[in-house]
Image (cartoon, rainbow, N blue to C red):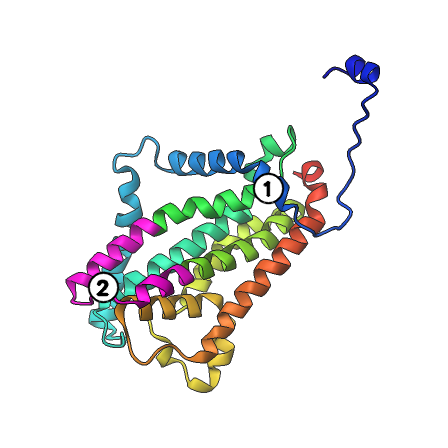
Amino acid sequence: MTPQQTARSGTEIVIEPPRQLGAINWRELWEFRELLQQMVWRDVTVRYKQTALGIAWAVLSPLIMVAIFALIFGLWGRLPTNGVPAPAFFLAGLIAYNFFASALAGSANSMLSQRGLLTKIYFPRLIAPLSATVAQLVDLLIALAVVQALALYYGFVPGWRLLWVVPLCVLWAWAAALGLGLWLAALNVHYRDVGQLVPFLTRVWLFASPVIYPVSMIPAKWHWLYGLNPMVGVIEWLRWGLFHTAPPPSPVLWLSMLVSVVLLVTGLWYFRRTEHAFADLV
C-alpha cells in the first residue's frame, strides 16, 4: 500500500518498541519460521558447497582428532576411560564438545554475519542466533550415528537410556551454546573484540571439559565447582547413555544443567534488552 492509498483509506501504521523489554514474542517467531528454515538450510549448504567430500567432513573431522587423541592420550598417556575403548570414549566427548563450540561461535557472530539483512529489513533478531545453532545439529546427528555404530562394534548394545539420555544431552548442549551465544552476540555488536575472544575461549574450554579424561580424575570435593561447566554434565551423561558405564554420573553434575538453563534464560533476556540498537551499530 502506497502512502497516498494509506492516507485515503484512513489507515495509520504505528511502529512501537516492545512494552516489556526482554519479553519474547513467540507468535512473531512462529510467523517468521520460514525465514528460520531458509537461514538454516543456507548455513548447511554453504558450509559444504564446492567441497570434494561434502557432508562427509562431519564424520572425518572428529575421526581424525579421535585418532590423534587415542594415540597421544590413550596409548602413550594411558588416561583412564572408565572401561570404554579409547576411540569410542574420545569420540563421544569430542562430538558433543564440537557441537557446543561450533554453535557458540556461530551464534556469537550471527549479528555481524547477518549485517546485510539486519540493516535492510525487519525480522525477529533472535532468528539469527537460532539458525546458527540449529544448523550445527545436522553435523551432530550424523556424528551421533557414527558413535552409535562404533559402540555396537565394541559390543555396547543400545538400551533404554539411548531413548532419553542422548536427546536430553543434545538439548542440554544446545541450551548452553545458545544461552552463552546470545550474550556474546549482543556484546559482539558493541565490542568487536568479542569475536576474537570466542576462538580462544572454545580452545581453553576444551581442556576444561572431560573430552579426553573422565570426571573421576577430578577429586570428588571439587565436583560442585567442576559442574559449573555445562559441558561436564553433557559429556558424562552422554557417555553413560551410549556405553552404559557404571556408576551413573555424580548427582552434583546436575548443576551443569542448572547453569545451562540460567545461561539460556539470562541470554534471552539480555539479547532482547539490547536488540533495538543492533541495526544502528553493526
Q: 2 or 108, which lies in front?
A: 2
75 relative position to 120: left or right: left
Tell me which corner region of the image, top left, top right, bottom left or bottom right, holds residue 244: bottom left
Disc marking residue 87 = 2
Q: 173 or 218, which lies in front?
A: 173
Disc marking residue 86 = none
Where 240 falls versus 194 (above or below)? below
| Percent of width and height locating residue 17 | 77, 41
Q: 189 or 245, which lies in front?
A: 245
Disc marking residue 29 = 1
User: Element type at marker 1?
Assistant: helix
The answer to whether residue 212 is seen in the rendering is no
Residues drawn in magenta: 141-169
| Percent of width and height locating residue 39 | 49, 36
The answer to whether residue 119 is seen in the rendering is yes
Q: Amino acid at mark 1?
A: Leu
Q: Residue at x 74, y 15 (%)?
A: 2
265 relative position to 170: left or right: right
**Which residue sits furthest bottom?**
221
Mark 2 and mark 1: span between their CA atoms?
A: 41 Å
| Percent of width and height locating residue 263 | 58, 62
Q: Amino acid at mark 2?
A: Pro
| Percent of width and height locating residue 189 | 64, 45
Tell me which corner region of the image, top left, top right, bottom left or bottom right, holds residue 233: bottom left
Mark 2 or mark 1: name the one nearer the start of the chain: 1
86 relative position to 49: left or right: left
User: Element type at marker 2?
Assistant: helix
Q: Residue at x 34, y 60 (%)?
A: 94
Magenta span contains residue 197 = no
Where 155 falls versus 11 (above or below)? below
Q: Residue at x 32, y 68 (%)?
A: 161
- Mark 1 Cα shell of 10 Å, populated few (<14), some (14-19), many (≥20): some
